[in-house]
Image (cartoon, grey):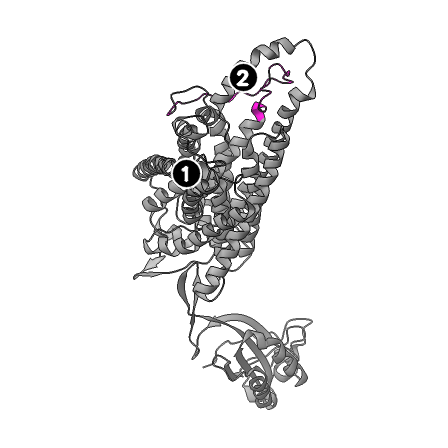
Amino acid sequence: MKLTKSLLVGAGLTALPTLALAQDAAPGFDEIGPYIMTTLLFCMAGFLVFFMAAGFAMLEGGLVRSKNVTMQMTKNIALFSIAAIMYWLVGFNTMYPGDFNGYFVIGGQTVLDAVGVSAADAALDYASVGSDFFFQLVFVAATASIVSGAVAERIKLWPFLIFVIVLTGFMYPISGSWQWGGGWLSEAGFSDFAGSTVVHSVGGWAALAGVIVLGPRLGKYKDGKVNPMPGSNLALATLGTFILWLGWFGFNGGSQLAMGTVGDVSDVSRIFANTNMAAAAGAVTALILTQVLYKKPDLTMVLNGALAGLVSITAEPLAPTLFGSLWIGAVGGIIVVLSIPMLDKFKLDDVVGAIPVHLFAGIWGTIAVIFYNSDASLGTQLMGIIAYGVFTFVASLIVWFILKAVMGIRVSEEDEINGLDMAELGMEAYPEFSKG
Amino acid sequence: MRRNRVPNLCPVKGMPSFAICNAGRPANLRGHVVKLIIATIKPFKLEEVREALTEAGVRGMMVTEIKGFGSQSGHTEIYRGAEYAVNFVPKVKVEIVVAEAMADQIVQTITKTAQTGKIGDGKIFVLDVEQAVRVRTGETNEDAI
């Protein structure tokens, strides 16, 4: 997402006279080809990133206990749908406001291109509004999904969904505008290609704030010991991880934001290869590391390792060599395996490992940009990481505390033990299985 | 005191009442006694035990997957970096009802087949069965198994 709207508007203005001159003759493929190809890229990549919603749902459904699966599925489909509506209502134009002060502006509703838009009215140097809007929309949903996994198994449905409204309509778009909307961080030279920080760390910070305000699940930390609560279905969790991995090709590849030249289309494929390598390296690292540390490989950590590899490469999936992607992803895998027990030490109960995967690996990936992208500097990268961290963490804490004070965010002890499925929804995910 | 008193079903039409009418009578009046053998074994031994028992003439068994602990106690596992105790170990419970005369041989067969020599091989309990009835015919005790 290097391209920003303010640049676009500028480019569009300078291009106007030429377009006006060319209006008599029908535009040739040289003029409309890039627009068509980039719009196609956004649609395809958008579908892939959309499918990540299914990946998150399956991963989370597999890693929570069976008494909370219906609730986890409900939250996942609700959060995606809420994100889609909020992003239309204010999010998209808040995040991509065009010319603005660089810090904050609340945008209006998204308006699509006219039906059968003519070449003269289309943004020929970019892509159709519909494809751009859709592609950006599926990113914000990913951010909200990150939160839902961390706070699983004890949060009430409605306070969570209200948080999603604030996160997807305001918090994410405002902070997103600083970088991808052409705001102050992009002016300062911060580099985050597809969103290690802008998307993943933001989700991670919001999740961390939620986990702190919410407290751990009952019985998770007792007498100074950690009591693991194994997930209900590791086949689903694995399927979810593979779906996320697939979706990530759209996430990173689509963020090239252009497919109209030989260079661009090659770059998109280069990103696919690098993204895949980082995921593989993260998974293998976690596999070996858990074998060494715990004498048996831990599948749930291997899954987290693959995702950590993906998050790590997301800030710069284009510039690294395949070997570069390998070691950047591998470090992500190490981070996740070491930081999951560390969070437990602080009694921060993150059910699916969302904070290590998206926040810690996201910070790492944002720093790792400096190794292969000569335009990035460590100072600027750290400044961006801190800016997003402070804003999202503080804003999230405030929202969580307000929700806690106004309506309570946690279910009762009895409801938590009986499971959110029956307590909050009156519906079990697996009603025909006996209680074990 | 008699527990589980079975109502006298003799007047019910179409039932083989001669058999059901045995119900509630003292055991020595009802022909041969049967025994219930409850064996808890290691799950991976189930198939071997089933084969050996079938060969020994056992014609039916009830199998339940259970969890429990005995001298083996539990063990520890690691999930996402945190060690936790597995207090209940998975076992398979096999229940077999056999004629009294066969009971000792069956117990020996199970002991021989389910044994690995390592801790956690399981236990066998032998109980008297007050009454056994075949639902389809109403036959009782040894005739019912």
Q: Amino acid at mark 1?
A: Val
| Residue A251: image location, x then y, percent | 54, 38
Q: Is residue A435 visible?
A: no
Front-most of residues A409 and A205: A205
| Whether residue A260 can be seen here | yes
Q: Residue at x 68, y 8 (%)?
A: A24
Instruction: Identify the residue at image location x=63%, y=18%.
Output: A115
Toward the viewer: A220 or A119? A119
Where is A220 relative to A12, above or below? below
Question: A392 and A305: which one is in front?
Answer: A305
Q: Position of residue A138 (x, y in %)?
A: 52, 34
Name the element at disc 1. Answer: helix
Residue that carries the numbered disc 2 in the rendered image? A12
* Range of residues picked out in magenta: A103-130
Out of A172 and B38, give the one closest to the viewer.
A172
Mark 1 neighbour class, 10 Å CA radius: few under 14, some 14 to 19, many 20 or more = many
Q: Secondary structure at mark 2?
A: helix
Q: Which disc is residue A30 wearing?
A: none
The quadrant the N terminus of chain B occupies is bottom left
Where does the image place residue B37, in percent across and percent down from the top left? 55, 82
Residue A208 vertical placement versus A127 (above, below): below
| Amino acid type indicated by mark 2 | Gly
Q: Earlier in the sequence, mark 1 or mark 2?
A: 2
Left or right position of A198 against B142:
left
The residue positioned 42% from the left and 75% from the top of the image is B73
| Callout count | 2
- Mark 1 sits on what residue? A202
Gap in angstroms between the C-alphas marked 1 and 2: 31 Å
Image spot of residue B33 (x, y percent): 58, 87
Q: Main secondary structure of the magenta part?
A: loop
Mark 1 vs mark 2: give the one in front.
Answer: 2
Residue A164 painted magenta? no
